[in-house]
Image: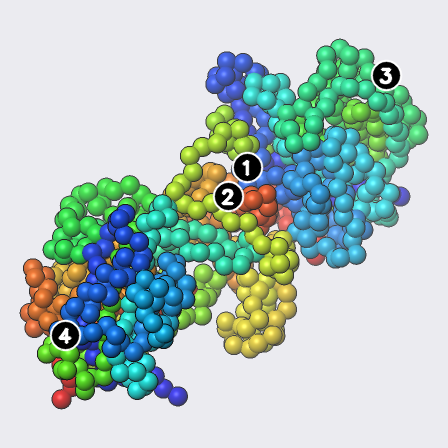
Amino acid sequence: MRGIISYGAYLPRHRLDRGAIRATLGQGGGKGTRSVAGYDEDTTSMGVEAARAARWNGGFAPTAVHFATTAPAYADKANATAIHAALGLPADVFATDHVGSARSAVGALRAAAAEGGLAVLSDVRLGRPGSADEAGGGDGAAAFLFGEGDGVVAELVGQASATAEFLDRWRVPGETASSTWEERFGLGQYLPLIQDAVTRALAAAGVQQPDFVVLSSPHARAARTAAKPFGEAAADAIEPVAGWLGAAHAGVGLTHALDRAQPGHTVLVVSGADGADALVFRVTEAIAGRPQGRGALDQFAGAPDVDYATFLTWRGGLHREPPRRPDPVRPEAPPAARAAHWKFGFVGSRCTSCERVHVPPQRVCAGCGHTDEMAPVSLADTPGTITTYTVDRLAFSLSPPTITAAVDFDGGGRFTCEMTDCRPDEVQVGTRVELTFRRMYTAQGVHNYFWKARPRVTSAEVRACENGGRNT
Amino acid sequence: MASNGIRDKVAIVGMGCTRFGEHWDRSIDDLLIDAVSECVASVDGFDRQDVDAYWLGTMGSGTSGLTLSRPLKIANKPVTRVENYCATGSEAFRNACYAVASGAYDVVMAVGGEKLKDSGFSGLVVPPASNDGTASDPSAPAVFSLLAPAYAKKYGISEEQLKEVLTRIAYKNHKNGALNERAQFRSEVSMEKIACSPIVAGQLGIFDCSGVADGAAAALIVRAEDAHKYTDRPVYVKALSFVAGPAQGPVDPDYDFTSFDEVVASAQDAYRQAGVTDPREEISLAEVHDCFTPTELVLMEDLGFSERGAGWKDVLEGAFDLDGDLPVNPDGGLKSFGHPIGASGLRMLFECWQQFRGEAGDRQLEDPKLGLTHNLGGQPGACVSFISIVGPDLEA
């Protein structure tokens, strides 16, 4: 049996009321909300968060990382390598990007399914101010670990694809907004392609009527039209609140389906992008081990609204007055490479003589003074408590004021770091926090990735899940 | 092994100090020339050619001894540029004293200067070293603001009470600075204005922060036995202490942000060198590193002027006012002078120099016997600390 071993979704904790666009511009907008990546997030960092959420079903040992996005943080440099590093994966694990079209997501899923890899689907969707894409897009990520054996929670039982060359949506590299051809042309192209792929995939799977249908297309009307015959099974719970998530949309939809599916249920995933692709999964008994209460919409439930000006600022559309402070300097390649385990994996050191934990890792122990008696220890998944903090109105930030907190980690180690996803009034001495992988800033074209702390989600469900299901 | 000190072995026989402030019309060269010239002129008949060696403290206004030798046309003499964060100027002084005490040179000048205003930035900017991008970069007020809530919590005082204490410190230093023609800010500031100033970081308003200024200062140092050849009122060095901490506070769960261990260590060392056993009684004036108001509060305890947890009461009772029993920052401190890094330590010594020589004008203290100067650089839990003790009298 081959299929999905574990999965995770990530939606950023910011939402834009689509109505706010019209209120500002007098055009665009619409009903509902869209998800908005934080000022310190991009497709790579959100991909890391989704992948971290997908580590719950036994040993997490992907053979490869396949990262898909329409908005890569880098070109000429792989983005999957940062995800690989943040997950602390060994060097012999392959990592590559699938970028450009939303169909790249299917490429990542197929590649990961074929070899027991990890598919990480992540996107940030932009459009010109006032456009349908701006209001209808959204930001988010999903990750799927594939493998074989009893641990499979959703067996891949059929797949089919149909490819066609036609001009419906396009974007020249470097542009942030895409262009589309007249809607009815694309509709006419997509519907038969989708029908063809779906028919063949269901036939291959021996499935008549799937229990859940996830439909994703950059052509919104094509997706809606293709969904109609499936009725309630194809209801898209993600789009109305988070928007169309580009290369991540089918993936986030699939996690939402798997979160609700029972053993024996079938899930049809359809991507209508530059052709059509259909994958059919059958849920197994192993689905019982899935985490509770950490689904995409659970994470998004308490997301506060950002105003439209903030949204534009975060996405680079409004260049606001900076503080009279030096611009951030780019991290340098050799020190970043030397510190890769620390920088990307939050790996500190534990003294083997006195057990003192050091973050960042040290050679000389601050406790017993012994030299070079350290073992690496990752604190990326270790919660902590704020011992003191301050609100900094002088330091550079795209989202001032900056909150800096000294965090004492459970089991030892203190680190002073930036807080994110919270307002000053949400931080107190004693606040429980967890780490999240972020893009600190970009300087001279270099994205500086590192970890920040955010207030911890502390629902009873999450605690129960962590106590029972945390992998090692 | 011991920190033996050089008590009464060297003396300051001349000093100079520019006005601190926004010197839009002065380069670092100009400021250094001005300070050195005033220092030379303070010694009757002294010829600058008789200086055997120079130590220059500057954090970012130049590198190498050429920063001083070029503007002053110092020809082929040892000029050493030192840097040690906010203790940079003090560090130039300390090393210059050792050079004289060792017998290596007869006459040495310590110079400190900094040109901060040209950058156009708010607050201090430390030039970046090679970096992997993982160090957080909070502003200086942000890291020092951590002292305030930690102190209040530990000693059970309310945030409002603490704000009053911090306000009192800023008020006192501005009041002193108003009496000093070399200060950057020469006005008293009302407590109300201080307390209501815009917040910069944490609880700290703009008036809880020292300013940004340009300035330079210089001291001429000779062996104690030679001092009276130069002046009838020399100032003798009683103690010099400098420590760099292990910088683990920000990553040490045991650190509680209510003390500077480095200051405690350097104070103990300095008091031992100088034979001081009761600093509150024996020190006549203290120039301490009031980069932010909570720093000065904590320093009162770390320097042994107040009992632990009692510094805030002493502040409110006026113990450290100009007319208190131990005046702290009688010249106005960093609050009134700003903090041109390389110059600050020598500026503090300049206040001792003036006080001991009876030249402090409206700020003049009655018969001061021992002065303490203190700098710290870095942040709570990770800093360097310098302390000097100086006095007008040789131990009998």
Q: Residue A420 carries which label?
A: 2
Q: Distance between the residues labelled 2 and 3?
A: 45 Å
* Of the image marks 1 and 2, the number of the one nearer the N terminus: 1
What subunit carries mark 3? A
Amino acid carrying label 2: it is Thr
Indicate whether A156 appears above or below A411.
above
Q: At numbered mark 4, what does the secondary structure look like: helix, strand or loop? A: loop
Q: At numbered mark 2, what does the secondary structure look like: helix, strand or loop? A: loop
What subunit carries mark 1? A
A76 or B300, which lies in front? A76
Percent across and percent down for residue A256 are 70, 32
Q: Residue B45 carries which label?
A: 4
Q: Residue A192 carries which label?
A: 3
Indicate whether B354 appears above or below A289.
below
B359 or A299, which lies in front? B359
Mark 1: few, some, or many residues within 10 Å (few <14, many ≥20)? many
Amino acid carrying label 1: it is Gly
- Residue on which the image places disc 1: A38
Q: In which quarter of the image is the C terminus of chain A?
A: bottom right
Q: At numbered mark 3, what does the secondary structure look like: helix, strand or loop? A: helix
Q: How far apart are marks 3 and 1 (CA)?
A: 38 Å
Q: In which quarter of the image is the N terminus of chain A?
A: top right
Disc count in the image?
Answer: 4
What subunit carries mark 2? A
Amino acid carrying label 3: it is Pro
Camera sees residue B326: no
Q: Distance between the residues labelled 2 and 4?
A: 64 Å
Left or right, residue A338 beside residue A62: left
Q: At numbered mark 1, what does the secondary structure look like: helix, strand or loop? A: loop
Mark 2 or 4: in front is 4
Q: Please report the residue visible at 26 percent of the width from the left and 83 percent of the height from the top.
A: B106
